[in-house]
């Protein structure tokens, strides 16, 4: 194991310089609850959204070992270290559900295998690369080393040769993974609480569409000043693959 094993993953409070304590509802809207608005939704909308909280899908596609590995990867791709354990948004079960149901965007980039195969190949490549560089699996190499390995995939420059990257473009796999993480996280009402999103606009519409004014059921933003841990790649930005063009879905503004 590396010297980074004891690294504290929590974001740092900008005012005190100390790691923030985990909470049920981090973010800029600590007193806001999207679910408080559920009586204004129709029955179908309410059923779909409540299921995201109470009916987390059981694993059907990934093996237990693959799921643990993907959980470790997702924890670095989209950290939730300022959430308490009871309010960590379940990303891996949602990815597993999509793959088990074989739900896709309806197209595939040239050179990319089907999503199921891409995940199987990509996860194995991540674990194999960790073993090549650190003589341990990805979950055992320590957080800074995990960040560095995943950053190399983002940059399109894996640090060790692996046959997987001859079978699919590394930047396309990265965007597949990133897109699934973002979709699973920001479709959950706890993430809506975090960003102050008031939930579905149907059947009750949003009325105050100008000047950034809140709706009557929304709350004002509170300060949530934080910084990434000093060893983390979260504070850095660069284009995927070191390129300026966007890697995303056609006609959707560069999103996956």
Image (spheres, rainbow, N blue to C red):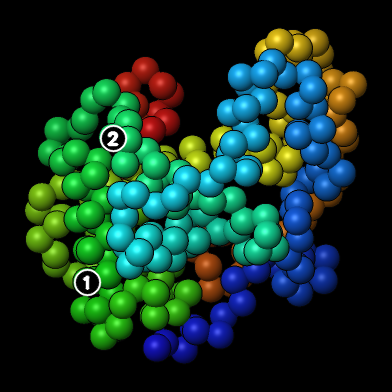
Q: Is residue 127 above or below residue 249?
A: below
Residue 112 picture quarter: top left
Residue 133 drawn at (x, y percent) = 26, 80
The residue beneath circle 1 is: 128
Q: Earlier in the sequence, mark 2 or mark 1?
A: 2
Q: Which label belongs to residue 108?
A: none
Identify the image quadrant of the N terminus.
Answer: bottom left
Judge the density around disc 2: few (<14), some (14-19), many (≥20) Cα neighbours within 10 Å: few
Residue 245 picture quarter: top left
Mark 2 vs mark 1, CA separation in Å: 26 Å
Residue 150 drawn at (x, y percent) = 37, 62
Q: Can see residue 182?
A: no
Is residue 97 shown left or right of residue 131?
right
Residue 134 drawn at (x, y percent) = 29, 83
The residue beneath circle 2 is: 102
Judge the density around disc 1: few (<14), some (14-19), many (≥20) Cα neighbours within 10 Å: some
């Amino acid at each position: 194991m590396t010297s980074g094993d004891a690294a504290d993953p929590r974001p740092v409070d900008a005012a005190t310089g100390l790691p923030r304590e985990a909470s049920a509802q981090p973010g800029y809207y600590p007193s806001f609850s999207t679910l408080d608005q559920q009586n204004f939704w129709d029955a179908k909308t309410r059923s779909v959204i409540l299921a995201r909280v109470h009916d987390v899908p059981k694993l059907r596609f990934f093996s237990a070992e693959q799921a643990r590995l993907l959980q470790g990867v997702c924890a670095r791709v989209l950290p939730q270290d300022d959430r308490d354990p009871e309010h960590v948004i379940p990303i891996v079960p949602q990815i597993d559900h999509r793959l088990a149901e074989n739900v896709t965007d309806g197209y595939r980039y040239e050179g990319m295998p089907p999503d199921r195969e891409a995940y199987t190949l990509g996860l194995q490549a991540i674990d194999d690369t960790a073993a090549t560089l650190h003589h341990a699996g990805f979950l055992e190499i320590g957080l800074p080393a995990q960040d560095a390995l995943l950053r190399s995939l983002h940059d399109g420059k894996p640090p060790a040769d692996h046959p997987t990257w001859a079978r699919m473009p590394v930047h396309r796999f990265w965007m597949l993974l990133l897109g699934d993480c973002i979709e699973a996280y920001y479709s959950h009402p706890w993430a809506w609480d975090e960003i102050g999103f008031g939930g579905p606009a149907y059947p009750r519409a949003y009325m105050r569409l100008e000047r950034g004014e809140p709706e009557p059921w929304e709350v004002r933003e509170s300060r949530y000043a934080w910084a990434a841990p000093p060893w983390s790649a979260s504070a850095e930005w660069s284009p995927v693959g070191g390129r300026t063009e966007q890697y995303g879905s056609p006609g959707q503004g560069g999103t996956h």
